[in-house]
DNA sequence: AAAGTTCACAACCGCGTTCTG
DNA sequence: GCAGAACGCGGTTGTGAACTT
């Protein structure tokens, strides 16, 4: 605008890029859970994320929103996408507005990977074969969401932690698409018409030899169709967040609906976030995303995982186990400071606390250093 | 079994639009 | 009304998994 050229949205050299780690997802979710997302640009800093605001927004809208519908596009959906595309062309967000819980990005991808090809084949082969082609392409697209595993690679060792996103009901949303607009869906509309309460339930299940713990946090912050949440993570190397677990009650207020009390640890709980990143089954990327702990640390951490101590630690961290049962020796479980995880070492000494942060935020983030603000904002 | 290719999709980029002071 | 900031959208790219040779 006005001759100066477009200013970059952020300093690319100082933000993390590429696939999101589970801990980043949790950070973002827990921040939005508590504070909403009024200002995307400021959010990463306030949430202690080394990400561009745009990136946060995208991650939230496309993958972390609790109202997202996971799973296959049905044939009917695909057919109607094709029809809507005939009308609107590549107006993905417009098309997406007809599919509660679907994102424009998702629809765009489905179009580019399946529907466009199908259409092209249809035209070249004629309608006789189109049914066959249709079933082929649609089964391939469906397979992409048939099942989802938290970790794509090796199975977990010693114990498993399964995060289940169980969005089992529909709900309605506000007008703004970002706030989860809910367009016309018959089932949802019916529910709305009949005043049927709608909610989404997400669960964390932690299994080990001792049994199963299920942590459920419920959400009813407006909502959408978020039927059965399962899908696969093909590319990118990071798990999609059906496996992450959150729920929102009211205006991002977490509420516990099960016997277990579970609150997502917030920024100050460095150990929790670190452990999430270090926990082998949670890592979709075998390679660390950022400067990692040294070999010694990693191997001792692995031992912890293998010995199952991590579970005790997690339980104690989450307040799931009474303290008398928690025998873990903290000396044995030295977690790297979270700052090291997210902030390259060379910047650690430059971490001022933002003066503008309000007291409430300060309470949350007092322990969490913010990225130096070089943008002048 | 290894190498090469294709597929699927998450994430990024840049531009247009909207908002705010 | 204007300028700059912020947001939203659509196109494109990067990358890991799956498949083929």
Image: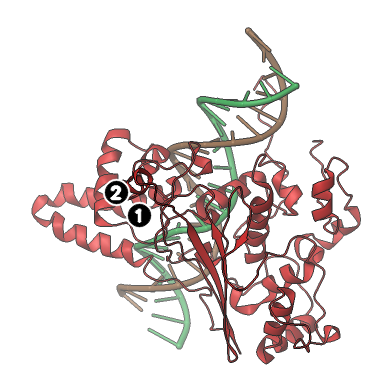
Chain colours: A red, B green, C brown
Looking at the rendering, which quadrant does residue B4 occupy? bottom left
Q: Are marks 1 and 2 on the same chain?
A: yes
The chain letter for the residue carrying disc 1 is A
Q: Position of residue B12 (x, y in %)?
A: 60, 49
Looking at the rendering, which quadrant does residue A86 occupy? top left
Q: What element carries label 2?
A: helix
Describe residue A303's horizontal placement relative to residue A366 as left or right.
left
Looking at the rendering, which quadrant does residue A376 occupy? top right
Would residue A143 be visible to someone looking at this image?
yes
Describe residue A361's horizontal placement relative to residue A247 as left or right.
right
Outermost residue on the left side: it is A128
Q: Position of residue A33 (x, y in %)?
A: 64, 53
Would residue A240 be visible to someone looking at this image?
no
| Tag shown at residue A113 | 1
- A355 above or below A29? above
Residue name at image x 24 percent, y 52 percent: A76
Q: Position of residue C11 (x, y in %)?
A: 44, 40
Residue sitting nearer the eye, A263 or A161: A263
Q: Mark 2 points at which residue?
A: A116
Q: Where is residue A11 in the image (x, y as percent from the top left)?
A: 73, 44
Q: Do the residues labelled 1 and 2 touch (CB within 8 Å)?
A: yes
Residue sitting nearer the eye, A121 or A57: A57
The chain letter for the residue carrying disc 2 is A
Residue name at image x 76 percent, y 66 percent: A341
Q: Residues within 10 Å of mark 1 (few under 14, many from 20)?
A: some
Q: In which quarter of the image is the N terminus of chain A?
A: top right
């Amino acid at each position: 605008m006005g001759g100066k050229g477009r200013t970059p949205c952020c300093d690319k050299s100082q933000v993390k890029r590429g696939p999101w780690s589970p801990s980043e997802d949790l950070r973002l979710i827990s921040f939005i859970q508590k504070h909403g997302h009024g200002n995307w640009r400021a959010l990463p800093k306030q949430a202690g994320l080394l990400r561009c605001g745009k990136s946060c927004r995208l991650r939230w809208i496309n993958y972390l929103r609790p109202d997202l519908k996971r799973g296959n596009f049905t044939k009917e959906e695909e057919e109607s996408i094709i029809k809507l595309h005939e009308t609107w062309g590549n107006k993905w967000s417009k098309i997406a507005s007809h599919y509660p819980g679907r994102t424009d990005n998702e629809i765009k991808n489905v179009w580019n990977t399946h529907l466009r090809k199908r259409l092209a084949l249809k035209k070249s082969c004629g309608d006789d074969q189109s049914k066959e082609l249709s079933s082929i392409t649609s089964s391939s697209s469906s397979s992409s969401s048939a099942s989802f595993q938290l970790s794509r690679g090796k199975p977990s060792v010693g114990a498993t932690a399964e995060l289940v996103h169980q969005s089992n009901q529909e709900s309605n949303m506000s007008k703004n698409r970002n706030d989860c607009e809910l367009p016309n869906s018959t089932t949802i509309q019916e529910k709305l018409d009949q005043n049927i309460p709608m909610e989404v339930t997400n669960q964390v299940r932690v299994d080990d030899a001792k049994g199963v713990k299920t942590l459920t946090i419920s959400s009813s912050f407006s909502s959408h169709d978020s039927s059965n949440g399962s899908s696969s993570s093909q590319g990118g190397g990071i798990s999609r967040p059906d496996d992450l677990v959150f729920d929102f009650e009211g205006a991002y207020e977490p509420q516990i609906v099960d016997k277990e009390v579970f609150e997502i640890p917030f920024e100050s709980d460095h150990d929790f976030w670190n452990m999430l990143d270090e926990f082998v089954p949670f890592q979709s990327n075998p390679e660390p995303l950022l400067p990692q702990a040294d070999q010694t640390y990693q191997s001792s951490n692995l031992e912890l995982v293998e010995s199952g101590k991590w579970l005790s630690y997690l339980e104690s961290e989450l307040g799931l186990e009474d303290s008398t049962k928690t025998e873990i020796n903290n000396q044995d479980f030295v977690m790297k400071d979270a700052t090291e995880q997210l902030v390259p070492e060379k910047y650690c000494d430059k971490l001022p606390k933002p003066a503008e942060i309000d007291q409430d935020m300060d309470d949350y983030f007092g322990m969490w250093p913010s990225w130096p603000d070089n943008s002048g904002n």
